[in-house]
Amino acid sequence: MFNEIVSWIADLGHWAWWTVAVIFVILEIFAPTFFLLWLGISAGIVGLITLIFPSMTWEYQWTFFAIFSVVSLVVARNFFKKNSGTEDNFKLNQRGAQYVGRQFKLMEAIENGRGKIHVDDSQWTVSGPDLPEGTVVRVTGNDGTLLIVEAIN
């Protein structure tokens, strides 16, 4: 029974592998594991090889599929391990840290160490030396929602 099923699938040729490739890609879309994508790509490559060599037996097809799957997973894993991109996003949820180095004009004077600036669409409380309203300041750091500023000469 098993051999009949495998033989029937092998008789479908490259279409069977391309169907498997599409199924893997669709599964990857709905259940993003970043694993099934490489199996789908491997199945697509085996489908292409089967199109070029239609008389290839199912044993070779499955062997190529296994080899391409392992190689693509290892290459992808190593590539994304080296290019993780985490350094670009380390300030993603630290809004105050994103303003460090930017310059703003004081909308309220800093008195007793506290003032306000207008940043994009919101107001932020700032901490720094006493300065008059309208002074241009640079954000040098933050402490939670408090921005630490210094005057720019």
Image: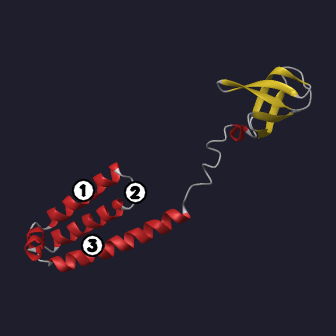
Q: Are marks 1 and 3 in contact (CB under 8 Å)?
A: no
N-term mark: 1 or 3: 1
Which amino acid is tagged 3? Phe
Q: Residues within 10 Å of mark 2 (few under 14, many from 20)?
A: few
Residue furthest front as drawn = 1
Q: Which quadrant: the N terminus?
A: bottom left
- Quarter assignment of residue 72: bottom left
Q: Nearer the viewer, mark 2 or mark 3?
A: 2
Q: Residues within 10 Å of mark 1 (few under 14, many from 20)?
A: some
Q: Which residue is mark 3?
A: 65
How is this picture coloured? secondary structure
Which amino acid is tagged 2? Thr
Q: Mark 2 to mark 3: distance in Å? A: 19 Å
Residue 23's disc is 1
N-term mark: 1 or 2: 1
- List x then y, in percent, for residue 135: 85, 25
- Quarter assignment of residue 17: bottom left
In this image, 60 relative to 109: left or right? left
Q: Which quadrant: the C terminus?
A: top right
Work out whether 65 lies above or below 123: below
Which residue lies at the image location 37% right of the left edge and 73% below the top edge? 70
Helix, strand or loop status at disc 2: loop
In this image, 90 relative to 124: left or right? left
Work out whether 93 lies above or below 153: below
Residue 33's disc is 2
Which residue lies at the image location 89% right of the left edge and 21% below the top edge? 132
Is 79 or 123 nearer to us in this picture?
123
Helix, strand or loop status at disc 3: helix
Helix, strand or loop status at disc 1: helix
Work out whether 87 lies above or below 56: above
N-term mark: 2 or 3: 2
